[in-house]
Amino acid sequence: CREHPESFEVKALSAGSNVELLLDQIKEFKPELVSIKETKVGELKEALGSIKSELGGYVPEIAAGVDGMCEVAAFPSVEATVTGIVGCAGLQPTVAAIKAGKDICLANKETLIAGGPFVLPLAKEHGIHILPADSEHSALFQCIQGLPEGGLRRIILTASGGAFRDWDVERLKTAKVSDALKHPNWDMG
């Protein structure tokens, strides 16, 4: 939307509990509907009130919680829904979008890992395309476009190395789970 505003428009946004970020996105994209965690609705309304003049009278409709996320995901005037909610929390909004006839730009793998046996047949039933939006998934998807059915035997994925990127082969032989969880870029808790 930032890079191609002539081609894309944000109609609805869902946020977890980050009022400040949602407020910035409201100012930038002017969505018709936003959703936030139930306990943050009051804070969002107060923040919107404080920038009312900056918004020129525009105020989005506010929804909350899981129902709000589903309402955003199934927003009537959109063609595609980007679902990037972390973990299994993205499953319900993705299902809502599919049932509403929205193509899915999927930016979380858990929706397919946890819900694949339900989500994929549902998407097929509704004639919905599920497209990978996350960088690694999208790169793989783009690589296999145009291949005939059965034209790919296997994919070999390599990783950045994570916690083991500087280890030699001998040290790798002694690696433990606790070592793997010491990823240099994020806390894998």
Image (cartoon, rainbow, N blue to C red):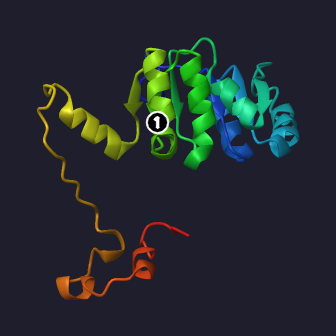
Please name whichever residue, 125 or 107, is drawn nearer the observer in this view of the structure. Answer: 125
- Callout 1 amino acid: Pro
Residue 167, percent from left and from top: 25, 82
Q: Is residue 75 visible?
A: yes
Residue 72, percent from left and from top: 66, 26
Q: Is residue 86 visible?
A: no
Please name whichever residue, 21 or 37, is drawn nearer the observer in this view of the structure. Answer: 37
Image height of 13 relative to 134, above or below: above
Quadrant of the rendered image containing residue 153: top left
Image height of 51 relative to 170, above or below: above
Residue 184, percent from left and from top: 41, 72
Image height of 10 relative to 16, above or below: above
Quadrant of the rendered image containing residue 133: top left
Q: Residue at x 43, y 14 (%)?
A: 127
Q: Residue at x 69, y 19 (%)?
A: 32
Q: Residue at x 58, y 42 (%)?
A: 85
Q: Is residue 170 left or right of residue 62?
A: left
The quarter of the rendered structure image containing the C terminus is bottom right
How many callouts does the rendering have?
Answer: 1
Q: Is residue 55 left or right of residue 91?
A: right
Please name whichever residue, 158 or 58, is drawn nearer the observer in this view of the structure. Answer: 158
Q: Residue at x 74, y 44 (%)?
A: 19
Mark 1 crowdedness (10 Å alpha carbons): few <14, some 14-19, many ≥20: few
Residue 134, percent from left and from top: 40, 41
Q: Seen from this angle, which residue lies furthest top?
A: 77
Q: Secondary structure at mark 1?
A: helix
For disc 1, the marked residue is 117
Q: Is residue 120 left or right of residue 90?
A: left
